Amino acid sequence: MTTDRISKEIVLEAPRAKVWRALTDATQFGRWFGVAMQTPFVAGATARGTITHAGYENLTMELAVETIDETRGYFSYRWHPYAVDPNVDYAREPSTLVEFQLTEVSGGTKLTVVESGFDQVPAHRRDEAFRMNEHGWTAQLTNIEKHVAT
């Protein structure tokens, strides 16, 4: 088992174009991810939003968008995993890379999510960040599945 990378996949019963919009339209992304996005996703820019999950509403999520490539069905951003302490300046830490890849399959669209770079997270919070995001991505795949089913 690797501790540097989380990899999850799900087949969504939805067309690729609908899943793509759910990932790359900041408003739609926010609906299933649990964040009120205040800025759109633009490659090379930072997108920000307020987390809407109970108990975390005082936190801002920042995503440094790297790639938005609809032709390849590839979207990626960097962020600071499990950055939940408002008294910590996470900007000083290395970020992890989150990659979404879409593939058309029989019956819908396969979504693969990979988050890598945990080995670079400071040792004092690495295990918890990995554990929380491992569980978090499982929940988020269920959330996007529900979102694209509507």
Image (cartoon, rainbow, N blue to C red):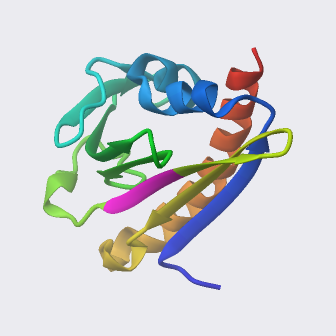
Q: Position of residue 93 (x, y in %)?
A: 20, 64
Q: What residue do we see at 50% from left, 19% from top?
A: 28
Q: Which quadrant would residue 51 be assigned to in this image?
A: top left
The residue range painted magenta reads: 96-100
Is 99 located above or below residue 3 in the figure?
A: above
Q: What residue do we see at 42% from left, 52% from top?
A: 82
Q: Name the dominant secondary structure of the magenta segment.
A: strand
Viewer-proximal residue among 59 and 106: 106
Viewer-proximal residue among 50 and 5: 5
Q: Can you name the residue that lies furthest to the bottom here?
A: 1
Q: Which quadrant would residue 122 be assigned to in this image?
A: bottom left
Residue 57 visible in this rendered orientation of the protein: no
Horizontal arrangement in the rendering, residue 121 relative to residue 100 (left or right)? left
Horizontal arrangement in the rendering, residue 91 relative to residue 75 (left or right)? left
In reply to whether residue 64 is colored magenta, the answer given is no
Horizontal arrangement in the rendering, residue 106 relative to residue 57 (left or right)? right
